Structures are given as structure tokens and as C-alpha cells.
Image: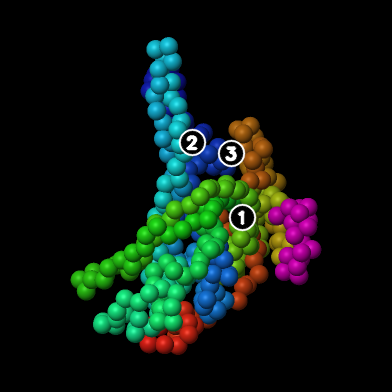
């Protein structure tokens, strides 16, 4: 063997690809995502659902498919050369599976959606009793309207957005004007111990892409509800660690402080000012704790690979690809209600949630 690695060795390839640059090219994790349903408030006829549970829908998503596309194409001959010609572009439906929660938020959303498009849900039981005879429309005897005869002109959903996250940044896929193509409440089984779930298939008219920094409320609605806002002791806000690089280290703290100052976030709210002040105090303490030997060791580690120099201040969470807001103001939690979430239709027989 003429080299330290031997005659056949290439184990450093994956390391240099996925780990160098603080995991810049590391694969995203499937579990690190956030879904937001943007509902047209004018379409919701249930104030209890709209005010308390609108923001919770996305948190109850179990699995979500990202957008899918396909082209209709045809192969033509151009002087005996094969040419592929596009004829049409199609957006394929995506499936979203949701937990069937104990309060009934997911079922309530479907009930409101169903009642918005289909008149049947709001009819009393008398509208479906046997013995009813056919009646001419647009007459005094035409007491009930069925099916899609519901005067609906606007969509229930404005958009449904799926955000994947990694290294404190998000990539967003926003489905424009989505409509539910199919809905399933799943099935129940005395012999099973799995959680109940509901599944929807969404069609949509277009897709918008977005990207940005992950923080409290960015993307919209993220970490504002049912979120643990107590800082980790390894983060700068929770005390940080006495290292130059890495999560909660000195460079991480300086990045946060100057980033908040540069963006103006420190002056946006008392919470932003307080969190920046705490980060400054903790970073100062960690700077004082650094030893010359430790600085030398970390500097050698950075300089051993030129690619690490430009990315030394970029950090990742303890879980590869995990992203959590640096600071957050505790948002008020919703209170579960025991009454119907959609029971605000005019009283009448058969009007149930």
C-alpha cells in the first residue's frame, strides 16, 4: 500500500459532499415541515371554528405530498430526427393525511367545507323524509335546495402551503385555489390500536415557490400556536456554550445579535429587544470563558478545510436538518371546546355537526 487509505478507498467522498460547509448539501428530513391552510373567512359560517381552530388545522397534518406535475407530449419526426413536443401541462392532485383529533377540529373543517359547497348539510331532516313528491322549481312549494344549488362563487381555500425546513431556512410550495377532490374519514376497527385519520386529495390551479429565514411567524403562522418557546440551554437565548463555533457558540450569538440589529427586529417589539439583550449578555459571558488553547484548536479545525471558513458562522440544530425559531413570544393557546365547532347553522331537525 502506497497511500494511507490503501489501494481502494473513497470514504471521504460522502463526508465532503454532505458534511462540509456545515451540512450545506445534506438531505432534508421528511419530518421537518409545516403546513398552513389559508381559508377565506367569508366562506366560514362557524365563528367558533374560525376564531379558535383555523390555525390548528395545519398542525394536525400527519403526511403531506408535495406538488406533482406532468407534461402531455408527443414525439414528432423532423426530417427523420425525433422531436418531443409539449401539448399540455398538468398539475396532479396531492394527498394530505390528517389526524382525527379528539376535539374534532379536522372533522369540523370538513363539515364547514361540505356545508359551504353542498346545500344538503344545512337542510333539516324533513327535507329527506320519505313520501316527498317532486315539486316544480322556483315556486312557493320549492322549500328546499339540494346538492350544489348553494350560490357559491368563491373558493373555500385561498391556498394551502407546505413548507420544508433545514438549516434555519424554509422552502415553500403554495397551492393556488385548491379544492378538495375527495375526502375520506378513514375507518374504525375494534381490533386495531392505530390512531384514526382522515385523508383528502387536493386539486389546484397553480403553484408558487418561496424561500426565507425561519423565525417566529415566518413562514406565516409558524411557531405561533402550541409551541415550546422556552429556549434550550444549548441555544444563545438559553445560555449558550463556551465555544467559538457551533450551535449556541460565540459566532452563533454574534450572528443573531447583529442580524437582529441589521434587520431592525430588535426594535419591532419589547420581546425582540429583550431577546437580543439576553443573547448579548450570554454571548459576552461565553467570550470571557474561551481559552487560548480552545481558540487555537477550533481555528485549526476551521482552517483545515477552506470551505469551512465562509460557513463557520452557519450552524445547524442537534438533529440534522432540524430548524427551530431563535426567539418567540408566547402566543395564547386555544381552548378546546366541548360544543359543536360548526353548530351555528339555523336551528332545525337534522342540523348536526
**Residue found 56% across the figure and 41% down from its top:** 24
Q: Residue 191, relative to residue 15: is it above or below?
A: below
**Residue found 51% across the figure and 33% down from its top:** 16
- Can residue 162 be seen here? no
Q: How is the image coloured?
A: rainbow
Which is nearer the N-term, disc 3 or disc 2? 2
Q: Disc 3 marks which residue?
A: 21
Asked whether 20 or 112 is in front, the reply is 112
Query: Whole-Å distance between the Cαs marked 1 and 3?
Result: 19 Å
Q: Residue 220, relative to residue 345: is it above or below?
A: above
Which tag is nearer the camera, tag 1 or tag 3? Answer: 1
Asked whether 44 or 20 is in front, the reply is 44
Segment tinted magenta in the rendering: 256-273
Which is nearer the N-term, disc 1 or disc 3? 3
Which is nearer the N-term, disc 2 or disc 1? 2
What is the chief secondary structure element of the magenta stretch?
Answer: helix
Q: Disc 1 marks which residue?
A: 214
- Can residue 79 be seen here? yes
**Residue found 57% across the figure and 76% down from its top:** 51
Residue 183 % position (x, y): 37, 63
Q: Residue 86, relative to residue 115: is it above or below?
A: above
State yes or no: discs 3 and 2 in contact (Cβ < 8 Å).
no
Query: Whole-Å distance between the Cαs marked 2 and 1?
Result: 26 Å
Magenta segment includes 295: no
Residue 308 image label: none
Residue 15 image label: 2
Which quadrant of the figure has residue 124? bottom left
Residue 335 % position (x, y): 52, 81
Query: Whole-Å distance between the Cαs marked 3 and 2?
Result: 10 Å
Amino acid at each position: 500500500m502506497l497511500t494511507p487509505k490503501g489501494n481502494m478507498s473513497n470514504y471521504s467522498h460522502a463526508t465532503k459532499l454532505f458534511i462540509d460547509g456545515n451540512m450545506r448539501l445534506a438531505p432534508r428530513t421528511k419530518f421537518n415541515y409545516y403546513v398552513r391552510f389559508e381559508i377565506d373567512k367569508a366562506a366560514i359560517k362557524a365563528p367558533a371554528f374560525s376564531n379558535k381552530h383555523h390555525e390548528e388545522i395545519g398542525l394536525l397534518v400527519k403526511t403531506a405530498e408535495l406538488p406533482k406535475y406532468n407534461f402531455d407530449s408527443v414525439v414528432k419526426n423532423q426530417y427523420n430526427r425525433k422531436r418531443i413536443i409539449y401539448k399540455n401541462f398538468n398539475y396532479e392532485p396531492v394527498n394530505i393525511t390528517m389526524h382525527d383529533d379528539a376535539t374534532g377540529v379536522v372533522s369540523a373543517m370538513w363539515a364547514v367545507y361540505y356545508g359551504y359547497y353542498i346545500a344538503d348539510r344545512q337542510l333539516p331532516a324533513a327535507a329527506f323524509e320519505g313520501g316527498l313528491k317532486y315539486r316544480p322549481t322556483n315556486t312557493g312549494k320549492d322549500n328546499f335546495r339540494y346538492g350544489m344549488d348553494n350560490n357559491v362563487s368563491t373558493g373555500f381555500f385561498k391556498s394551502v402551503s407546505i413548507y420544508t425546513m433545514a438549516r434555519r431556512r424554509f422552502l415553500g410550495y403554495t397551492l393556488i385555489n385548491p379544492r378538495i377532490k375527495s375526502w375520506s374519514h378513514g375507518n374504525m376497527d375494534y381490533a386495531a390500536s392505530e390512531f384514526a385519520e382522515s385523508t383528502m386529495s387536493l386539486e389546484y390551479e397553480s403553484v408558487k415557490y418561496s424561500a426565507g429565514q425561519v423565525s417566529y411567524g415566518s413562514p406565516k403562522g409558524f411557531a405561533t400556536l402550541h409551541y415550546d418557546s422556552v429556549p434550550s440551554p444549548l441555544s444563545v437565548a438559553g445560555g449558550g456554550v463556551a465555544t467559538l463555533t457551533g450551535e449556541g457558540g460565540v459566532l452563533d450569538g454574534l450572528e443573531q445579535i447583529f442580524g437582529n440589529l441589521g434587520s431592525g427586529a430588535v426594535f419591532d417589539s419589547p420581546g425582540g429587544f429583550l431577546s437580543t439583550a439576553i443573547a448579548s449578555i450570554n454571548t459576552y459571558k461565553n467570550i470571557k470563558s474561551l481559552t487560548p488553547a480552545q481558540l487555537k484548536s477550533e481555528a485549526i479545525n476551521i482552517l483545515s478545510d477552506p470551505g469551512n471558513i465562509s460557513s463557520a458562522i452557519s450552524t445547524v440544530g442537534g438533529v440534522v436538518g432540524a430548524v427551530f425559531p431563535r426567539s418567540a413570544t408566547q402566543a395564547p393557546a386555544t381552548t378546546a371546546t366541548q360544543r359543536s365547532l360548526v353548530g351555528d347553522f339555523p336551528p332545525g331537525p337534522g342540523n348536526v355537526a
